[in-house]
Image: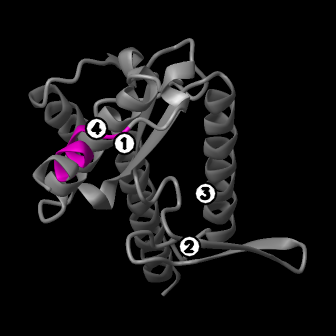
Amino acid sequence: MAAIKQEQSDACISSAEREQARRSANMAAIHSKDTKPEMIVRRGLWSRGFRYRLNHKRLPGHPDLVLRKYRTCIFVNGCFWHGHHVNLQFDDLQFTISNSECCKIPKTNREFWVAKIRRNKERDKAEQRQLAQMGWHCITVWECELKPSKREETLESIAFTLNHIWLRDHGAKAIPYPGLEEEEQQMPMAAEESLDARR
C-alpha cells in the first residue's frame, strides 16, 4: 500500500515538474526584439516609405523603432506585458489590477504578476517622460491594435501621425507681414468703382 502511494506521489511530482518545465520553456521563448507585432509595424511603415532605426541604445527605454527625421520613437507593446486597459488601483496597502479585454492576469501567482505589470507601466511612463523632455515624440502601438481586422487602420493612423508631426515641426511658419502707411488708408476696391461707372 505504501509503495502505491509513493508511486502516486512520484507521478504527481513529475507532472508538477513537467508543468513547471513547460511553463519555463514558454516564458523563455518570449523575446523582446523582432516580435510578430513589431514586424507587422516595421513592414507596414517600410512599405509606406518611412525609414527607421531599431532598438536605439542611446535613448531611454530602447524604443522599438526610432524615426530621426520625425523626432519620433515608436514602442510596440504586448497587451499582457504592459497592462493594456487594466485598471490599476491601490487598496489597503497593495495594488490590485482588474482584467481587461486584451489583458488577463493569471490566477496563479497573481501578486507577482500584478507587481510586474505595475512596474512595467511605471517604467514605460518614466521613459516616455524622459524622451519628451529630450524633445522626442512617442507613439505606443498595442498588440491588440494589430489584429487583422484593425491592422490597416492602425498603420494608416501611424503614418498620418508621423506626417502631422513632420508638418508641425518643419512646416511653413506664419510670419507677420509688416504694414505700410499706404495700406492703412481706406482705398476703394476696383469692384466698387465699377458700380459708380455704371450710373
- Above or below, 59 against 24 in this view is above
Name which quarter of the figure residue 199 lies in.
Answer: bottom left
Q: Amino acid at mark 4?
A: Glu
Which residue is labeled 1 in the image? 30
Give the number of the mark in front: 2 or 3. 3
Report if the CB atoms under discs 1 and 2 are less than 8 Å apart. Answer: no
Residue at the image position 35 percent from the left and 50 percent from the top: 26
The mark nearer the N terminus, 4 or 1, is 1
Which residue is label 2 attached to?
108
Distance, label 4 to label 3, CA atoms, is 20 Å
Numbered range of the magenta stretch: 188-195
Mark pair 4, 2: CA separation: 29 Å
What's the residue type where badge 2 is placed?
Thr
Residue 88 appears at what percent x and percent y?
A: 67, 71
Q: Is residue 2 magenta?
A: no
Give the distance between the C-alpha atoms of the residues marked 4 and 1, in whole angstroms: 13 Å
- Whether pointer 4 and pointer 1 mark residues with C-beta atoms closer than 8 Å, the reply is no
User: Would residue 167 be found to the left or right of residue 124 on screen?
Assistant: left
Give the residue drawn at x 17%, y 45%. Answer: 194
Which badge, 1 or 3, comes first in the chain's sequence?
Answer: 1
Image position of 13 (left or right of 125): left
Earlier in the chain: of badge 4 and badge 3, it is: 4
| Label 2: few (<14), some (14–19) or many (≥20) C-alpha neighbours in 10 Å | few
Residue that mark 4 sits on: 38
